[in-house]
Image: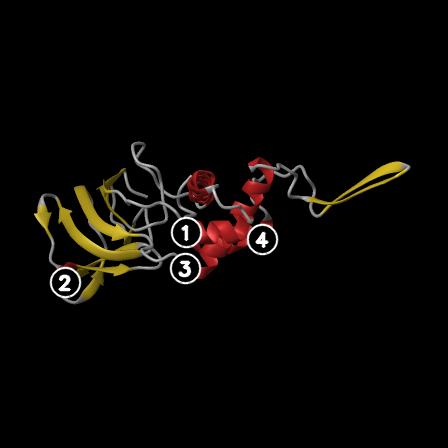
Amino acid sequence: MSDLFTVTTAATDLALLSLAELRRATGAADGQEADLVTLGARVAAVIARACKIAADGATAPTLRLETVADTFELDYSRPDLILSRRPIISVVSVVENGVTLTADDYRADAGAGLLRRRLDGRSWSWPPCFEIVVSYAAGWATVPEDLKLAAAKTATMIWAESGPSPRDPNLKRVRTEGIDEVEYWVPPASDSLLSAEILDLLRPYTNETIG
């Protein structure tokens, strides 16, 4: 993990679902567009938090495409630099102790979010440095389908809890034949806001190095 993370060009749209996709997920009626916009923002924020997406404190974290920068101060050599966001779409620049490296001096593992040093065509360790600044574009310009599915399920859950007709989304059945009987799909008290199914869908997008 870097010593300093900053967002240099923030995403203009943080939403993981379009209004039409939100409407299908919730069954919202016409005229509820403002509610759906708010819902979409909440879904994006909840999923970004669940995925432990790095934030700079000034810009909301997102899985959407942004240009960001990681600054490393290395006390010892490392085989890879672990970047704060992934997937890496492109590396804008790498500056090592004030010297801008060429594209031949490093190689990115886009999916893993790793940057490896190269020297004379071979993999090398990053040396102890006062400062290495990596500027890069990372995130999704087009939201993957499994991430959309997780977002849709999250939208359904939040809408059920706080929409126009709130209800417990875990409630399966209520019987009132003499004595009430309440049955839940899953235990209503849970350590996580999101279900195990949603968390499983988000696993490939979760940054285990943060938090």
Return the residue at label 1.
18
Residue contact between numbered discs 1 and 3, judged by CB atoms under 8 Å: no
Q: Can you give x and y, in whole percent of width and height, for residue 130 in the image?
A: 16, 39
Q: Where is residue 145 in the image (x, y as percent from the top left)?
A: 45, 60
Q: Can residue 74 be seen from the camera position used here?
A: no
Q: In this figure, which residue is indicated by the disc labeled 4?
A: 197
**Mark 3 = which residue?**
144
The mark closer to the camera, 4 or 2, is 4
Q: Nearer the viewer, mark 2 or mark 3?
A: 3
Residue 72 percent location from the top left of the image: 23, 42
Which residue has dot 2 on it? Answer: 104
Amino acid, disc 3? Pro
SS for dot 4:
helix
Q: What residue is drawn where x is 44% and y is 46%? A: 51
Residue located at (28% from left, 56% from top): 88
Q: In this orientation, which residue lies closer to the viewer: 82 or 178?
A: 178
